[in-house]
Image (cartoon, rainbow, N blue to C red):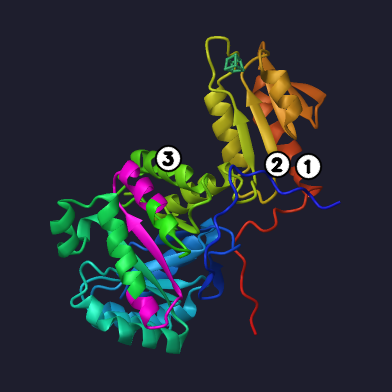
């Protein structure tokens, strides 16, 4: 019997499905995880190396900056050699929008707030994108909101962000172009959540979620998880990018964890560990860290419980595929609810890893963990 899909808080809102290279975004396509390279795009080798690292970490779509002609010149090689769809990120210079489309990028992110005379060029951009099968992201950002709207609203309110996005969307649609997604980013999760809620009521555009300039890893993770959680739990959001002042691989890890926590992506390895307290009879932090490190990269949905004492230890360990309930310098090892042995504390990590490997061999790797790939025609 096929496994039942894991329950989600709310069903996904129905959005239009667009192509981003060989992936779909929107509609019934799984929510994808994006990140952005930090290399100089014109350094093709360094950029491709970072894209390979992001791909290995589970990134679905990557964005690269394109501030100079040298960067634009590097786009064809990067778009061809990357194993995941490449989106060119364009600000200020409209000529790079066309360069990126012609370079074969899967999509182009345009910032209507700072591209010169953007509205006058939508027709040509739409035509070029249509001719090349390129999709567009209308990326409205609080920090670079259209001056007209800034004057009207006084600051980048949710209403201002949404008005900008809806206006630009209407221009593309007037020219018969529908292969675009929208983002309305703000650094304040409360404003950002409200903006996306309002935007999702205005049309069926696929939405790219992001809290812009979310901050260093710890703060940015909390802000993104809070905001994305609020939206995804209402079914809003088709692709996400966690922005951190940290290496981009960290953004991908956080993005995947957010989706897994909401059952929007099948869970792989899950460590259930207690926070420890005055009753703990082993060093739970060290145990949990060592077990996590020892099982990193596991592709099966294994649940491992690492518990500090007998209060909740046996219960959680019994519920997991594998677990340890510690006490008196020893660890009771549980496999599928049964105690299989008791080992001294110094052998707990090694025993758990050994048993995890044995169980993993009997499990199927997680399927459907990544967005649907469009079959090559
Ligand atoms: S399992 Fe034991 S050590 Fe861990 S938090 Fe609960 S009571 Fe404390």
Q: Position of residue 287 (x, y in %)?
A: 58, 28
Q: Note whether residue 59 is visible.
A: yes
Of circles 3 and 2, the one toward us is 3
Quadrant of res 30 = bottom right
Please give the residue where the numbered disc 3 appears in the rendered image. 226
Residue 193 falls within the magenta-colored stretch: yes
Q: Note whether residue 242 is visible.
A: no
Q: Residue at x 19, y 60 (%)?
A: 149
Please give the range of residues in magenta. 171-197
Residue 292 falls within the magenta-colored stretch: no
Please give the residue where the numbered disc 1 appears in the rendered image. 359
Quadrant of the image containing the C terminus: bottom right
Circle 2 crowding by C-alpha within 10 Å: few under 14, some 14–19, many from 20: many
Q: Position of residue 18 (x, y in %)?
A: 51, 72
Q: Image check: 309 left or right of 151?
A: right
Label pair 1/2, CB-CB below 8 angstroms: yes
Q: Position of residue 75 (x, y in %)?
A: 37, 80
Please give the residue where the numbered disc 2 appears in the rendered image. 302
Real-space CA distance between mark 3 and mark 1, rounded to the nearest whole angstrom: 34 Å
Q: Is mark 3 within 8 Å of ligand 1?
A: no
Q: Is mark 2 within 8 Å of ligand 1?
A: no
Could you say which is closer to the camera, residue 114 or residue 362? 114
Circle 1 crowding by C-alpha within 10 Å: few under 14, some 14–19, many from 20: some
Label pair 3/2, CB-CB below 8 angstroms: no
């Amino acid at each position: 019997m096929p496994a039942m899909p894991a329950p989600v808080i709310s069903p996904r809102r129905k959005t239009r499905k667009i192509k981003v290279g060989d992936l779909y975004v929107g509609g019934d396509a799984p929510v994808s995880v994006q990140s952005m390279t930090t290399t100089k795009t014109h350094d093709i080798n360094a950029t491709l190396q970072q894209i390979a690292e992001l791909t290995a970490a589970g990134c679905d779509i990557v964005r690269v900056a394109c501030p100079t002609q040298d960067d634009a010149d590097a786009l064809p090689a990067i778009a061809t050699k990357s194993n995941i769809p490449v989106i060119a990120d364009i600000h200020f210079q409209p000529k790079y929008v066309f360069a990126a489309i012609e370079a074969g990028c899967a999509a182009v992110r345009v910032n209507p707030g700072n591209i010169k005379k953007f509205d006058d060029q939508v027709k040509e951009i739409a035509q070029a994108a249509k001719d090349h099968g390129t999709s567009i992201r209308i990326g409205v950002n609080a920090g670079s909101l259209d001056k007209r709207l800034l004057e009207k609203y006084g600051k980048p309110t949710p209403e201002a962000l949404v008005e900008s996005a809806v206006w630009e969307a209407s221009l593309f649609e007037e020219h018969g172009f529908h292969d675009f997604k929208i983002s309305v980013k703000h650094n304040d999760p409360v404003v950002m959540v409200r903006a996306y809620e309002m935007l999702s009521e205005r049309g069926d555009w696929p939405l790219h979620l992001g809290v812009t300039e979310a901050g260093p890893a710890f703060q940015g993770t909390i802000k993104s998880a809070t905001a994305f959680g609020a939206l995804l739990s209402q079914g809003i959001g088709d692709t996400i990018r966690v922005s951190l002042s940290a290496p981009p691989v960290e953004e991908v890890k956080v993005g995947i964890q957010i989706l897994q926590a909401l059952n929007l992506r099948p869970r792989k390895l899950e460590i259930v560990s207690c926070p420890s307290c005055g009753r703990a009879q082993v060093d739970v932090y060290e145990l949990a860290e060592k077990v996590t490190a020892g099982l990193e990269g596991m592709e099966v949905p294994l649940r491992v419980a690492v518990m500090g004492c007998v209060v909740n230890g046996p219960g959680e360990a019994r519920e997991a595929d594998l677990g340890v309930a510690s006490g008196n310098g020893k660890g009771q090892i549980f496999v599928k609810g049964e105690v299989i042995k008791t080992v001294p504390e110094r052998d707990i990590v090694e025993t758990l890893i050994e048993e995890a490997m044995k169980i993993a061999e009997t499990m199927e790797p997680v399927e459907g963990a990544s967005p649907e790939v469009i079959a090559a025609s």
